[in-house]
Image (spheres, rainbow, N blue to C red):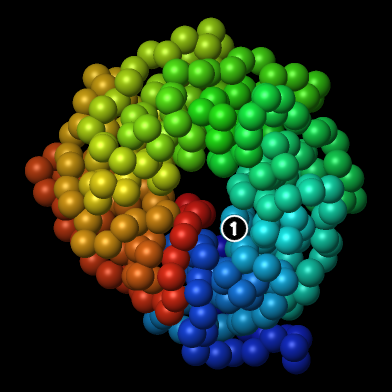
């Protein structure tokens, strides 16, 4: 990872600052050094050190709220999507926008990026996913979510090497895609409400989806068969992380609960209540599970989870009202 000293501002238009008093919409964390990037509903982007809680760069990213992002501190690159329907590629060392990608006709809600292959897959309220070449800005595929009613894309997971992706939509479905051909391989329709979170391991042929109906479903990505229904939440599930090799997942819901799951047996290992709503989560599923959650009130909390207890610790605080988080290990 690039040490924070090498990422000091070099562009006069970017400034070192205290955390802005604005409505932040997500935080992205770099592994090890715990660097972070925040985006606001005012369209600004801010880089900070989660160890000290100090901002080391702030710049305007979009004219409208930022909804999603992916980041790679190794290459000093980030990709952001916004209500302005633009996908932008950034250089974090300078704060420069390297490329603005036009194509979506409505808000961009979710994005997955491979910074080695320089490919991105974005999902939008325009009912499409778009596969982008970040080096050229070219649209390689447009994946159409074709339904009679609203089918806004809410979430996406992708493996660009295998050429597979899974998306969740407002039409209550999960779709499995071939990124090479643009073909929809399977449509999973057992949820009864919006699918707001999805994780996938295409090597193992598994997809896990979380819905506003309060359920998690584990799917076979090859056959399209539903393998497990995980019950425990009583409200919208919008935040989800999983490790299919270790058969574990963690989810949070509007019901105020966070649940650690055993995917092999299909039951909860640990359920605990949260003081504030968690709007983003990532986890390291070691023997003692470590999870990082972003609270709506701006606190970034690390949870150490065993099968009997949860030990929370606030590791950073940012001003504003949060809405999502992505963490880079």
Residue lying at 61% horizontally and 22% vertically, measured from the top left: 176
When the figure is inspected, residue 144 is found, relative to residue 80, above or below; the finding is above
Q: Nearer the viewer, residue 76 or 133?
A: 133
Question: Could you tell me residue 231's position as x and y percent?
Answer: 26, 28
268 horizontally vs 290: left or right: left
Question: Could you tell me residue 146's position as x and y percent?
Answer: 71, 25
250 horizontally vs 109: left or right: left
Total residue callouts: 1
Residue lying at 50% horizontally and 54% vertically, measured from the top left: 326
Q: Which quadrant, please, contains the N terminus?
A: bottom right
Task: Using the rendered image of the protein, determine whether residue 130 is visible from the camera's viewpoint.
Answer: yes
User: Residue extending furthest front?
Assistant: 149
Q: Quadrant of residue 66?
A: bottom right
Q: Nearer the viewer, residue 46 or 187?
A: 187
Query: The residue tagged with tag 1: helix, strand or loop?
Result: strand
When the figure is inspected, residue 91 is found, relative to residue 195, above or below; the finding is below
70 horizontally vs 248: left or right: right
Tell me the residue that label 1 is attached to: 67
Question: Could you tell me residue 155's position as x and y percent?
Answer: 56, 40
Q: Quadrant of residue 56?
A: bottom right
Residue lying at 58% horizontally and 70% vertically, measured from the top left: 41
Question: Could you tell me residue 227's position as x and y percent?
Answer: 38, 13
User: Residue extending furthest left?
Assistant: 308
Q: Nearer the viewer, residue 103 or 54?
A: 103
Residue lying at 43% horizontally and 70% vertically, measured from the top left: 321
**Crowd rating for badge 1 (residues with CA inside 10 Å; few <14, some 14–19, many 20+):** many
When the figure is inspected, residue 102 is found, relative to residue 9, above or below; the finding is above
């Amino acid at each position: 990872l690039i040490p924070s000293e090498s990422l000091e501002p070099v562009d006069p238009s970017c400034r070192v600052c205290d955390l802005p008093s604005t409505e932040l919409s997500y935080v992205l964390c770099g592994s090890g050094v715990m660097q972070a990037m925040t985006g606001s509903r005012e369209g600004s982007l801010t880089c900070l050190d989660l160890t000290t809680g100090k901002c080391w760069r702030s710049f305007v990213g979009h004219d409208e709220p930022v909804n999603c992002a992916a980041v790679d501190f190794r290459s000093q690159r980030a990709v952001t999507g916004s209500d302005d329907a633009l996908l932008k590629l950034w250089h974090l060392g300078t704060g420069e926008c390297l490329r603005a990608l036009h194509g979506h006709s409505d808000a961009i809600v979710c994005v997955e990026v491979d910074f080695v292959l320089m490919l991105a897959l974005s999902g939008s309220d325009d009912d499409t996913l778009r596969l982008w070449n970040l080096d050229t800005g070219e649209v390689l595929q447009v994946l159409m979510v074709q339904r009679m009613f609203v089918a806004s894309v809410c979430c996406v997971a992708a493996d660009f090497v295998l050429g597979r992706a899974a998306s969740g939509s407002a039409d209550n479905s999960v779709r499995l895609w071939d990124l090479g051909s643009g073909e929809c391989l399977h449509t999973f329709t057992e949820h009864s409400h919006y699918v707001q979170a999805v994780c996938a391991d295409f090597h193992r042929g598994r997809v896990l989806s979380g819905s506003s109906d309060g359920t998690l479903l584990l799917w076979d990505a090859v056959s399209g068969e539903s393998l497990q229904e995980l019950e425990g939440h009583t409200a919208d599930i919008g935040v989800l992380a999983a490790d299919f090799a270790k058969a574990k997942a963690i989810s949070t819901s509007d019901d105020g609960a966070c649940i650690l799951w055993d995917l092999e047996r299909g039951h909860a290992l640990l359920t605990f209540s949260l003081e504030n709503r968690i709007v983003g989560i990532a986890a390291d599923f070691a023997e003692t599970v470590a999870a990082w959650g972003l609270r709506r009130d701006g606190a970034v909390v690390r949870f150490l989870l065993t099968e009997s207890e949860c030990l929370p610790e606030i590791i950073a605080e940012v001003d504003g009202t949060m809405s999502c988080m992505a963490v880079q290990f």
